Image (spheres, rainbow, N blue to C red):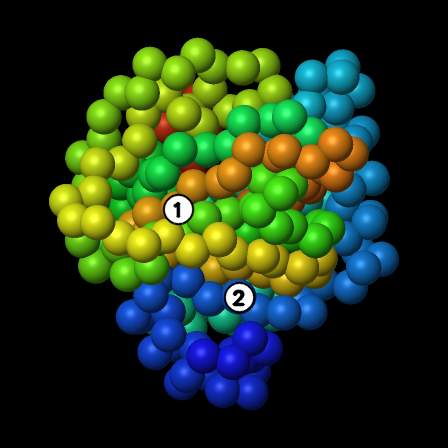
Amino acid sequence: MKKQLSFFKKPDSVLNFYSEYGYHIEYGVISDDVCDEIQLLAHQLACAKSGNFAPVMMPHRENEQFLHYMKNPQITAIMSALLAGNIAGLQSQFFFMKPGTRGFTPHQDNHFVQARHGAFASAWLALEDTCQENGGLVVYPGTHKMGTLPVVETNLKSLSAQDPNAYRTEVSLPVEVNPIHVSVPKGAVLFIHGDVVHASNTNASKDRWRHVLLNTYILQGEAFRPGRDAKRVEISL
């Protein structure tokens, strides 16, 4: 696969890669100016103003401007193709990931949503350059083909600057899979199959944050778990 493979130039190649490995990176989706705009908007959220900087679940409920980014036509066009149908938005989440923040343990996003296999996926928008040092993602290619996997308790203590579900459990892989560290540059979007196992590194940098806007999508009319805290509902795009 070529590093700069684009859905809008080679859609069949992207669909084949996603089907085989469970993810796709689309480069240059969002301009630097808009990335900066989203960061500024996030720092006006109550969590940021309090100095906590924990991930914000459903920031669009606090500021509807976040819905504008969920409805980005390039992102929704790619997502519709990956899910092979008409889609709805399902969830938004903003990650500040300040230096020192522990990353997520290996997990499947669909563990929380419980949608039909292949009907749900995530779009992970990097608002600045992300890499292993500042908390970039780790993907276990091809694991989406294994379906929903069991999880085990980690006994790790939750920290205030991270999602309470970040490392409470981790996926138990039936076979050894070599993970890859995914570097996603500013303005690029990592599309993640709902069942592909992935994790994130701890932000070990001294002064680099890892601002990311995550939006998730589902095929219209599909069943899903609303969630006690998330209270997910279909969002018209």
The structure residue drawn at horizontal position 77% and vertical position 42%, both measured from the top left corner, is 39
* Front in this rendered view, residue 179 or 66: 179
How far across and down, in percent of the image, does residue 173 sit?
21, 43
- Compared across the picture, whether 88 is left or right of 131 comes to left
**182 or 168: nearer the viewer:** 182
Q: In the figure, residue 108 lies in which quadrant?
A: top left
Q: Which residue shows up at 32% across the image and 25% down it?
A: 169
Q: Position of residue 73 (x, y in %)?
A: 62, 67
Q: Is residue 103 left or right of residue 71?
A: left
Q: Quadrant of the N terminus?
A: bottom left
Left or right: where does residue 227 sit relative to residue 72? left
Earlier in the chain: of badge 2 and badge 1, it is: 2
Say if residue 48 shows up in the picture.
Answer: yes
Image height of 212 relative to 179, above or below: above
Location of mark 2 (residue): 25
* Closer to the camera in the image, 83 or 27: 27
Q: Which residue is mark 1?
A: 198
User: Quick one: SS at disc 2?
Assistant: strand
Residue shown at 69%/30% (left/top)? 99
- Classify residue 19 by image quadrant: bottom left
Query: On the rendered image, what quadrant is the C terminus found in?
Result: bottom right
User: Image height check: is 145 above or below 74?
Assistant: above
Q: Is residue 133 above or below residue 202?
A: below
Badge 1 crowding class, 10 Å Cα cut-off, few under 14, some 14 to 19, many 20 or more, is many
Identified by mark 2, the residue type is: Ile
- Residue 229: image quadrant is top left
> Mark 2 touching mark 1, by CB under 8 A?
no
